[in-house]
Image (cartoon, helix red, strand yellow):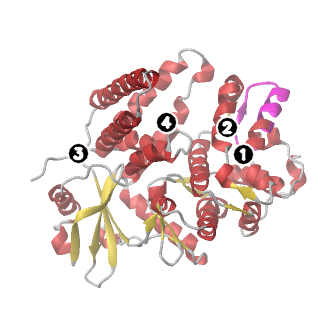
């Protein structure tokens, strides 16, 4: 049997991995600076450091690997060549031997794969942060995929978030403004739910129903009789991951088509059903040969309060129709806590909305030149104290993860077109917002 590649468990074991990774990264940066000062090429060193980072985070899996996936989406964080190396974390973590996968399936479903499926591939299609995926075929001929959860991954996730909570508490000792524990707790609640594959099956079914009226959007359907809490069987969708589609250098028309589909796939369920796919890295989207977009992996789906959704709808509607809007009333309606004077809050919110609403206010927008993510980061650094005094509700964490990830994907696609019209059509198909005069 091959050597097991189960993730390390326990807080100290996982914290030690991160510490060792940080030490190697610091040493690498120092050596890079020395070589650069001497006029030497640093490309091989950078590739080695990023490759080691991808390998270690892939071995750790869990929340650590999810952080690596987020880094791989950041167009501005790394040069394209280095970003391609770490992009392997989207679906190419070190895989578990098939013997271990088969044992988990038998424990969960009561029989080995060869008795449950007409065909079962020994090689994984993908190895992600919480489980790996194998292709299979049912006795009736349907192609399916089987996602099998790594042993101990729930414990590994808890360890990662315990470590993160410790760091949040340490920051909170300095000042009440820096206490981010409730946001860590929100992220923990949502990510830990990803280990319940029966819940994910329900979410996948719900998204398949939501996409039924969108012929070019797809979601795999669960096979309940071949699923359990740690094994999930879904109908198979064939296609290229969004990252591979981007790497293929598609033409202008294809970039626009996929960008428009991506907006509908991410934002549509939010406005139609108060639900949001909140894990938008490029490995979770497939572009089919027929020109459809498939959404995969429904472990992280956030359900929002109706009044929160309505607050976002009012903001978008007023921006799209270029109507007056009071951002302070809007954030309060969404559940924000405002702990500063109104003038400071309005000034900050105006700066935030200027960045966030650019595609909504421009008839033709070019995502190839979009700088909204780095600009928002720069604003956060420049006005950090004001940001801490306008605190969003916990659920905004997942909205930010999804919308920020979608913006990064659109930036990577680099399409230019009438995105404002796309958002207008999206809102027109959902229940109407209150009167525009309601908030300003």
**Residue depicted at x 44% and y 40%:** 67
- The residue tagged 4 is 185
Give the foreground label among 2 and 4: 2
**Residue depicted at x 32% and y 44%:** 58
Residue 57 coordinates in the image, percent (x, y): 34, 40
Q: Distance between the residues labelled 3 and 1?
A: 41 Å
Q: In the image, 380: left or right of 20?
A: right
Identify the element where label 3 is drawn: loop
> Does the CB distance between marks 4 and 1 fall below 8 Å?
no
Identify the element where label 2 is drawn: helix
Circle on res. 6: 3
First along the sequence among labels 3 and 4: 3
First along the sequence among labels 3 and 1: 3
Instruction: Give the quarter of the image for residue 342.
Output: top right
Q: Nearer the viewer, residue 18 or 309?
A: 18
Q: Which of 384 and 273 is in front in this view?
A: 384
> Does the CB distance between marks 1 and 2 fall below 8 Å?
yes
Q: How far apart are marks 1 and 2 (CA)?
A: 8 Å
First along the sequence among labels 4 and 1: 4
First along the sequence among labels 2 and 3: 3
Magenta stretch?
A: 333-350
Q: Distance between the residues labelled 2 and 4?
A: 24 Å
First along the sequence among labels 2 and 4: 4
- The residue tagged 2 is 376
Q: In the image, 149: left or right of 409?
A: left
- Residue at the top extreme of this rendering: 174
Identify the element where label 1 is drawn: helix
Circle on res. 356: 1
């Amino acid at each position: 049997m091959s050597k097991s590649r189960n993730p390390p468990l326990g807080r100290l074991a996982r914290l030690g991995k991160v510490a060792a990774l940080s030490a190697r990264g610091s040493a690498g940066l120092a050596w890079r600076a020395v070589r650069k000062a001497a006029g030497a090429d640093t490309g091989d060193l950078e590739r080695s450091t990023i490759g080691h980072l991808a390998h270690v985070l892939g071995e750790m899996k869990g929340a650590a690997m999810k952080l690596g996936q987020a880094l791989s989406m950041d167009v501005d964080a790394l040069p394209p060549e280095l970003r391609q190396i770490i992009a392997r974390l989207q679906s190419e973590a070190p895989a578990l031997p098939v013997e271990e996968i088969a044992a988990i399936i038998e424990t969960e479903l009561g029989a080995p794969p060869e008795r449950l499926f007409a065909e079962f591939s020994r090689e994984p299609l993908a190895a992600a942060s919480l489980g790996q995926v194998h292709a299979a075929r049912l006795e009736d001929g349907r192609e399916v995929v089987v996602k099998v959860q790594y042993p101990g991954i729930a414990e590994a996730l808890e360890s990662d978030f315990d470590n993160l909570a410790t760091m949040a508490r340490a920051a909170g000792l300095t000042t009440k403004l820096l206490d981010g524990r409730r946001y860590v707790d929100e992220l923990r609640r949502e990510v830990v739910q990803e280990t319940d594959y029966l819940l994910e099956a329900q979410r996948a079914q719900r998204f398949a129903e939501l996409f039924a009226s969108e012929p070019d959007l797809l979601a795999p359907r669960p096979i309940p009789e071949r699923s359990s809490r740690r094994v999930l069987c879904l109908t198979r969708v064939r296609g290229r991951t969004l990252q591979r589609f981007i790497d293929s250098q598609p033409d202008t028309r294809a970039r626009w088509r996929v960008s428009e589909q991506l907006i509908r796939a991410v934002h549509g369920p939010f406005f139609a059903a108060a639900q949001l796919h909140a894990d938008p890295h490029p490995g979770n989207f497939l572009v089919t040969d027929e020109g459809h977009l498939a959404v995969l992996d429904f472990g992280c789906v956030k359900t929002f309060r109706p009044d929160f959704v309505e607050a976002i709808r009012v903001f978008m509607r007023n921006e799209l129709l270029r109507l007056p809007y009071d951002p302070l009333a809007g954030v309060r309606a969404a559940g924000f806590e405002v702990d500063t004077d109104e003038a400071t809050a309005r000034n900050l919110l105006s700066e935030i909305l200027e960045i966030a609403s650019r595609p909504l206010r421009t008839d033709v927008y070019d995502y190839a030149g979009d700088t909204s993510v780095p600009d928002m980061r720069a604003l956060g650094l420049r006005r950090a104290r004001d940001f801490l005094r306008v605190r969003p509700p916990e659920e905004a964490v997942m909205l930010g993860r999804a919308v920020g990830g979608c913006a990064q994907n659109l930036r990577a696609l680099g399409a230019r077109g009438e995105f404002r019209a796309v958002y207008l059509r999206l809102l027109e198909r959902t229940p109407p917002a209150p009167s525009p005069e309601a908030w300003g």
